């Protein structure tokens, strides 16, 4: 049973466009929602994260939007660049999970020049 | 700091063979985890540890064994390799304090079981 569902599986965006990746979760006990970025041949790295007491968090060109009532959150990449081409994973965790993360299925983003 | 290191980078095993994937971290993190990554499945937790001598099962523990005798090392053992264990394996670590959710991943081990 996938507790965190991510879509789309793949995404192609033109340079300068907006990339949007969506995630939905089921467990209302989740209290931390990070996004990880993974380049080919590398391990994932934390990109940005949000807690459910805020509806939006922005870091540079990356923004997380969070809808607690709908149990959904999304990653927006503004002014997408070819260097953003990577696989993106959303994840969720709870305090009682001692930091263990439940990951979504991943989205492969390609930004065309 | 080297961060999280994993060896080997690539490995090919025959069905039934056993092996150990090595993981080490030099950040003095208490928490360490093993994940496997399969296409369309994301990363799934195999085993995790909250400190030396303490381990527990994750989502997909069958066929794997772990131990944690030191803070730095967290090896993953495949007891009798099966083709279903063909995957990319990632080790991760995190602090036990306020940044417990920020996991640092190693570069991965790509395992093929024939």
Image (tube, coloured by chain):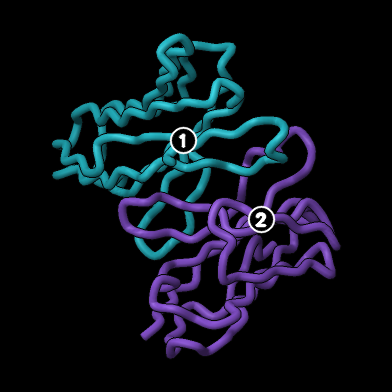
B47 lies left or right of B85: right
> Residue tagged by mark 2?
B57
Q: Kindly identify which numbered label has been placed on residue A94.
A: none
Query: Can you say which quadrant of the picture contains the N terminus of chain A?
Result: top left
Q: Position of residue A109 (x, y in %)?
A: 25, 44
Viewer can see residue B72: yes
Q: Which chain is depicted purple?
A: B
Name above or below for residue B9 compared with residue A18.
below
At 37% from the left edge and 34% from the top edge, which residue is drawn? A5
Chain label for disc 2 = B
CB under 8 Å between discs 1 and 2? no
Out of B48 and A22, give the one closest to the viewer. Answer: B48
Q: Which chain is depicted cyan?
A: A
Query: Can you say which quadrant of the picture contains the C terminus of chain A?
Result: top left
> Residue tagged by mark 1?
A3
B47 lies left or right of A86: right
Q: Position of residue B47 (x, y in %)?
A: 64, 58
Secondary structure type for disc 1: loop
Q: CA distance from mark 1 to mark 2?
A: 17 Å
Chain label for disc 1 = A
Out of A6 and A35, give the one closest to the viewer. Answer: A6
Q: Position of residue A19 (x, y in %)?
A: 25, 31
């Amino acid at each position: 049973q996938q507790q965190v569902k991510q879509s789309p599986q793949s995404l192609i965006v033109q340079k300068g466009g907006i990339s949007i990746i969506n995630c939905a979760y089921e467990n209302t006990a989740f209290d931390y929602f990070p996004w990880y970025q993974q380049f080919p041949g590398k391990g994932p790295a934390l990109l940005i994260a949000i807690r459910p007491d805020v509806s939006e968090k922005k870091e540079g060109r990356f923004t997380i939007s969070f809808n607690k009532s709908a149990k959904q959150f999304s990653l927006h990449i503004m002014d997408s660049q070819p260097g953003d081409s990577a696989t993106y994973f959303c994840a969720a965790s709870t305090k009682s999970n001692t930091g263990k993360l439940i990951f979504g299925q991943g989205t492969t983003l390609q930004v065309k020049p | 700091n080297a961060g999280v290191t994993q060896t080997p980078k690539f490995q090919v095993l025959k069905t039934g063979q056993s092996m150990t994937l090595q993981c080490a971290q030099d950040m003095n993190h208490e928490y360490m985890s093993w994940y496997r990554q399969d296409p369309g499945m994301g990363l799934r937790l195999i085993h995790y540890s909250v400190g030396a001598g303490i381990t527990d099962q994750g989502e997909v523990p069958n066929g794997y064994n772990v131990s944690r005798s030191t803070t730095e090392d967290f090896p993953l053992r495949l007891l009798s390799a099966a083709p279903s264990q063909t995957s990319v394996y990632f080790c991760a670590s995190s602090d036990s304090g306020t940044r417990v959710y920020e996991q640092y991943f190693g570069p991965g081990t790509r395992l093929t079981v024939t």
